[in-house]
Amino acid sequence: MSNRLWQRFTEDKVAMLVYINIAVFVFVRLMDFISLVGLMPNMWVLDFLEIPSSDIVITLLTRPWTIVTYMFTHYDFVHIIFNLIALYWFGKLMSALVGEHLILRTYLIGGIAGAIAYFIAPLALVPLHSHMLGASAAVMAIILCVSVMYPRYTIRLVLIGEVKLGWVAAAYVLIDILSIPGLSNVGGHIAHLGGAVAGIILALIWKNRGIPTSGLSKWFRRRHLKIVRGGMADADMEWNRKKVERIAEIDRILDKIKASGYDSLTEEERQALLNESKR
């Protein structure tokens, strides 16, 4: 039973990230409440999860885990709501268009890139007692990655109408750039841009070299080629031919979505899109 629950939890990478963020948020708030009512000694749990901007070297030596934990940590309700909405919406879009197996990789790389950008930002711009937490940089990586790979993909926004993904990504980046001179959460906005750069780099790599498959798929294909096919070259040609046909079919389905909407898809086309998102 526990294995089945764990499998369901890890199959949907976007939902998994949302659940982890919510769990950490509830834990932080609960610990804060327990300390507030005096049930335990006053301990600011965020000190162990967020990234401080001062004494960077000491922080990396004493609390290196914060480079990862900060991207799952929120304290303000509005902050986590906006981040999780963007994570879920763009994460699901990236799962369908690029591949669900790349969600966690993009999230973690974007979050780490945001931390690096935060550390190397000019210290004069960052308030001495500032700190950083939240999934914004990681989410920005997902937004920019899927937008760079599919800039002409059209989405429908409330009160605006149809907008291409490229323009949505440009708006996110522009907002962060224009927010830096205001000296309000400067470190956070710089970190967002660091995540955006990571997303762009990942997208360019995957566009030029092809979208990587999951580790399990690679293992299965190697085993299949060695034991069943025998001839490696022939097997590779066959696999590449099927891959080209599959990509062509997915492109046709995506064009149909752009022209007529998702509801116009047949059950077989929806299943094909779902299967592709899990590769």
Image (spheres, helix red, strand yellow):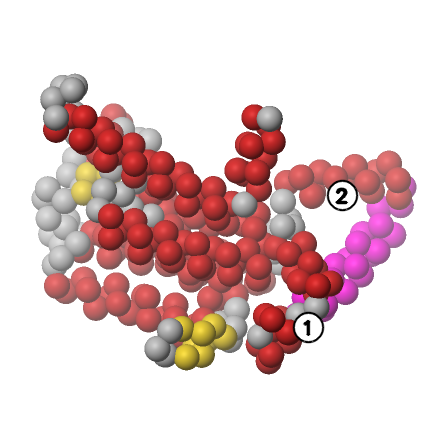
**Mark 2 lies on residue:** 221
Vertical order, 45 against 157 (above or below): above
Q: Give left or right: position of 6 versus 191.
A: right
Q: Which mark is residue 220?
A: none
Left or right of 43 in this view: 245 = right
Residue lying at 59% horizontally and 70% vertically, measured from the top left: 262
Image disc number at residue 252: 1
| Residue toward you, 267 or 257 | 267
Residue 149 at least partly seen: yes
- The residue at 47%/42% (across/down) is 16
Marks 1 and 2, the one that precedes in the sequence: 2
The residues colored magenta run 230-251
Residue 57 is situated, as x and y percent measured from the top left of the image, at 22, 33
**Is disc 2 surrounded by few (<14), some (14 to 19) or many (20+) residues within 10 Å?**
some
Residue type at mark 2 is: Arg
Give the structural element (helix, strand or loop) at label 1: helix
Secondary element at image label 2: helix
Residue 20 lies in the magenta stretch: no
Q: Tell me the quarter of the picture where residue 275 sits.
A: bottom right
In this rendering, the answer to whether 109 lies above or below 166 is: above
Residue depicted at x 32% and y 66%: 173
Mark pair 1, 2: CA separation:
26 Å
Residue 44 vs 188, above or below: the answer is above
Q: Residues within 10 Å of mark 1 (few under 14, many from 20)?
A: few
Q: Amino acid at mark 1?
A: Arg
Q: Position of residue 42 (x, y in %)?
A: 12, 24
